[in-house]
Image (cartoon, rainbow, N blue to C red):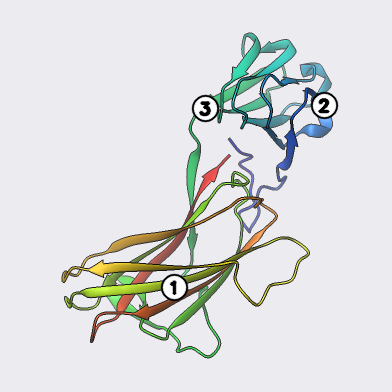
Amino acid sequence: MSDNTYNALGKPTINYNVKTTGINITLASIDSFSFYTVTSASVIVTLPLVSSVTSGWNVVIKNISSGTITVSAADLIDGNSSIILNTNQFLQVINTGSTFKVSLKSAPDFNIAKLSLVANTLEQGQSAPAHVKINSFVDALVVTSGTGIEFSVPIPGNYNPGTDIELHWGYQSSTTTAGNYNWLVSYQFQAPGTAITATPSTVTLLSDANTGTIQLKDVYVTLPGSGVTTAYSLNLKFELTARPSSTVAHVSMFYLKYQSL
């Protein structure tokens, strides 16, 4: 449920304007490409007349209250005079030019945003990660103790505001030596018009056990997204603090997994 026209940064050319309502509301043409979260049960969201808005006008409505809300219109909404939204249901309404069409769903979509290995930057004062071809096929970074990697990326334009984001990375051990890989992930969500802080908001340590076999492992940490919108950027620092003796990690992918509209 999103605008599918994106710019070079992967954001919609028209970003959703996130609004929160706890009272009855009547939508108008200026509300196109808005994302409404409804916080109170029994709220009525009234759509404008089809004839009063342009073709392509669309909004997304999500019920985050503990009860039901009603979306109504003087015109029919996909053949219905009103639609009931239960807790955590999404509704996208689109004006096709002659009628309102809707997409109703109870479970969110999840999207992937790949972070390029080439774009990874060295943390100042740390050792530069080397590149390696795994079996002459897959490009990877050689990450060892003391290696530091930093990212700064925009939040994807179809991200569902306020939801958690998972940072995933795929790696395999360079040898069959058993032991733990300890990964340290520091991060901060940066609001527009604010300065980067010297201390990350949260630091997460993930200890992942290598059982003595060489295999690709997909591991992740969850970054709480409360209050985050598509206007934010995400700053990350990624380090390996411990590893099995005489072995290194070959990291072949980084990506974000997030709920999308």
What label sits on residue 126 in the rendered view? none
What label sits on residue 28 in the rendered view? 2
Distance (Cα) linking label 2 and label 3: 23 Å
Callout 2–callout 1 Cβ contact below 8 Å: no
Residue 127 x, y percent position in the rendering: 45, 89
What label sits on residue 105 in the rendered view? 3
70 vs 213, left or right, is right
149 vs 58, left or right, is left
Amino acid identity at mark 2: Ala
Label located before the other in sequence (1 or 3) = 3
**Residue at 35% across / 83% down in the picture?**
144
Label located before the other in sequence (2 or 3) = 2
Dot 2: element: loop
Q: Which residue is mark 1?
A: 184
Question: Can you say whether 212 is above or below 54 in the image?
Answer: below
Amino acid identity at mark 1: Leu
Q: For residue 98, which quarter of the picture?
A: top right
Mark 3 packing: few (<14 Cα in 10 Å), some, or many (20+)? some
Dot 3: element: strand
Question: Can you say whether 131 is above or below 200 in the image?
Answer: below
Dot 1: element: strand
Distance (Cα) linking label 1 and label 3: 36 Å
Residue 74 x, y percent position in the rendering: 76, 10
Question: Can you say whether 71 is above or below 242 in the image?
Answer: above
The quadrant in which the C terminus is found is top right
The quadrant in which the N terminus is found is top right
